Amino acid sequence: MDPLLILAAALPECRLSAGEAVVREGESGSGLWILSSGALKVVKAGTEINTITRPGAAVGEISLLLDAPYSATVVASEPTVLRYAADGRAFLASDPRITQLIAVGLAERLHFVTTYLADLVRQYRDASPGLAMVGEVLGQLAHHQRPAAWPGSVREPDPDY
């Protein structure tokens, strides 16, 4: 059994039917879900970008760690069982192994994405000038760092400066 799922065993179960959403892109929340069984599809800006089937996979961790709205919609694609921590931060703080396992999951995903981006950059490197720009953009994405301060505020999230 997955180590994170073992640590989440005392959390209440959340059972979903196919088509039911766990989280919706742009909404806020403080929960954390751990997949026990079933399958979830991840949809970003209307495009399905991933399917989650691995027991022990976390949902909502990015929003929780960044204190930001959910970055994607996650929907059950078949009958699905998750463990649910209503206060995700308290669950993370309850045992350092939980935080480490979440970090490992995020690192695995980042490794996959950067490897994929590097492959795309290589494919477009010698393309026509218009397509070569794709490689440059992907290279920038692969090495993107969060700025020290974000422009804007709650009152003015998208300032004109």
Image (cartoon, grey):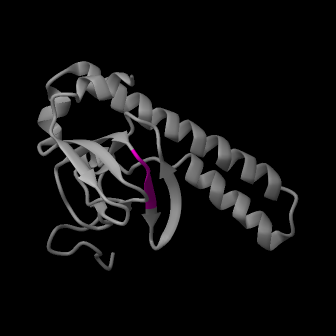
- The N terminus sits in image quarter: top left
**Going 32% across and 59% down the picture, which residue do you hit?**
17
Give the image location of residue 2, x and y in percent: 39, 25
**Going 20% across and 61% down the picture, which residue do you hit?**
28
Is residue 72 something one can see in this rendering? no
Query: For this rendering, which residue is in front, 44 or 53?
Result: 53
**Going 24% across and 24% down the picture, which residue do you hit?**
7
- The C terminus sits in image quarter: bottom left
Q: Within the magenta stretch, is there residue 5?
A: no
Residue 54 shown left or right of residue 22 in the figure:
right
**Going 44% across and 58% down the picture, which residue do you hit?**
42
Tell me which secondary structure the magenta stretch mostly adopts: strand
Is residue 52 something one can see in this rendering? yes
Give the image location of residue 126, x and y in percent: 88, 58
Residue 112 shown left or right of residue 52 in the figure:
right
| Number of marks in picture | 0
Q: Quadrant of residue 105?
A: top left
Q: Residue furthest bottom?
A: 160
Query: For this rendering, which residue is in front, 92 or 150?
Result: 92
Q: Which residues are magenta?
A: 38-42
Residue 134 shown left or right of residue 140 in the figure:
right
Query: For this rendering, which residue is in front, 55 or 18?
Result: 18
Query: Is residue 45 shown above or below 77?
Result: below
Q: Quadrant of residue 157?
A: bottom left
Give the image location of residue 128, x and y in percent: 87, 69
Give the image location of residue 8, x and y in percent: 23, 29
Residue 43 shown left or right of residue 152 in the figure:
right
